[in-house]
Amino acid sequence: MKLRPAVLALAALSATALQPVAAAAAQDCTITVGSVLSLTGPAGRFGQAAAKSVELAFQDLNEAGGAAGCRIVADVRDAQSQGTVAVDAARQLVDLQKVPVIIGGDISSVSIPIVTAVTGPAGVVQVSPVSTSPTLTTLAKEGKTGGIFFRTITSDALQGTAAAKYAIDQGLKKLAIVHVNNDFGVNMVAEFQKVFARLGGTVTSVTPYNQNQASYQPEVTAALEGDPEALYLVAYPGDGTTVARTWIAQGGPAKFLLNDGMNSADFIQDVGPQYLDDAFGTSSGTTATPSTDYFCEAYNGFAKEFDCQAPAADRAYDAAAIVGLAVAIAGEPDKALIKAAIPKVVDPAGETVHAGPDGFKKALALIGEGKPIRYEGVTGPVQFDQYGDITGPFRLWRIQNGEVTTIGEMSAEEVGRLKAEAE
């Protein structure tokens, strides 16, 4: 594969200052990785936070010596939170730029069409930091991904289960559900309902909504029927803000259960902190490692308008780190070799390495010696199963006084048990 000049196109992002790559990383060749993230649209905050993480991870890798002896950079394309746009962007990266791997998409409605229409047929590795739909597991089981899809976040088959138990534990036993009408929302709600009912909860109504509507008054009016005690809102911050404000304006109780993406400072500010003191939510959790501490300090200074708790930020760093180290193990930007190398980055028999330039220097030295490594990233030690999925704990949080506070954690073992009991 002919190596191209560096491309780092953060489409639709304002001209935030790109950090210069350290002089020590000035290799003579460049390996370009594709990235398709929603920099605009309802999921824009996810994609923007993730893009900064990818940039930081590759900067750290380059400072440590690069991948396969070359600088590694990202050509980031804006999916605009739309599957059709994402597919066009991915095709440009794969067919024209000949990238061997794509980081993305962020939301499942972007990742699924990319893997089915572009990366799967082309055999190009795809690593998503945020896509949680169980459909991606199903596609892998059916042999439709070719084993090229991996993700650094747990499936909604597990998050819906964790959310159901958390709701019951917080006394939220009679809920209306409003959810975004896409693969992510439908699957999350389906998994939630099975476990919630088994645990004694009652769902008074389930109302889907379509993105980018001018008003959600009809959906909220329908959801208020049946006298629910609280609203389970499965959404993205943009549309979710409008739904929540409409719910409050129409007299709905100011009690909410929220999905991971609603852990957003913009959502809290735009709805009004005074209405969210009884808002609870779940997110994929982390097992703290030295990578976690490094990332929080480095990202907060690097990303400026985002902090390390931003949805997608930690998992996007790990996705980029795993991709970069896989290229180093492969020894060249070859899609088949990178596919085989991805699981080797998190080899449980390998020597532990962490995030950041020092951790990556150690990793690259071990790779150069032909020794196995185990990258324990920002979200903790993970392994990929045969479907490219990971398992892990879930963070349980609530909003009070305008701040998101972690109040507990649910283990992967407990979530797995609850899910199995509800099947």
Image (spheres, grey):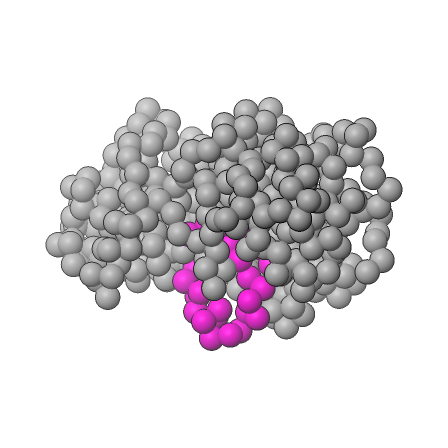
Q: Find residue 186 and report its horizontal and vertical position in percent.
A: 37, 62
**280 relative to 218, above or below:** above
Choose top left, top right, bottom left or bottom right for residue 66: top right
In this rendering, position of residue 226 left or right of residue 108: left
Q: Find residue 300 and report its horizontal and vertical position in percent.
A: 56, 26
Quadrant of the image containing the C terminus: bottom left
**407 relative to 412, above or below:** above
Span shown in magenta: 126-154
Q: Residue 130: say if magenta.
A: yes
Q: Observer-nearest residue: 405 or 254?
A: 405
**287 relative to 37, above or below:** above
Quadrant of the image containing the N terminus: bottom right
Q: Find residue 229 and report its horizontal and vertical position in percent.
A: 18, 45
Q: Observer-nearest residue: 360 or 7?
A: 360
Tell me which residue sits at (79%, 44%) in the image.
70
Tell me which residue sits at (53%, 73%) in the image.
144
Q: Observer-nearest residue: 338 or 72?
A: 338
**94 relative to 287, above or below:** below
Tell me which residue sits at (20%, 61%) in the image.
421
Q: Find residue 191 and report its horizontal and vertical position in percent.
A: 30, 60
In this rendering, position of residue 353 left or right of residue 168: right
Q: Residue 265: say if magenta.
A: no
Q: Answer whether residue 170 is visible to the viewer in this image.
A: yes
Tell me which residue sits at (63%, 66%) in the image.
119
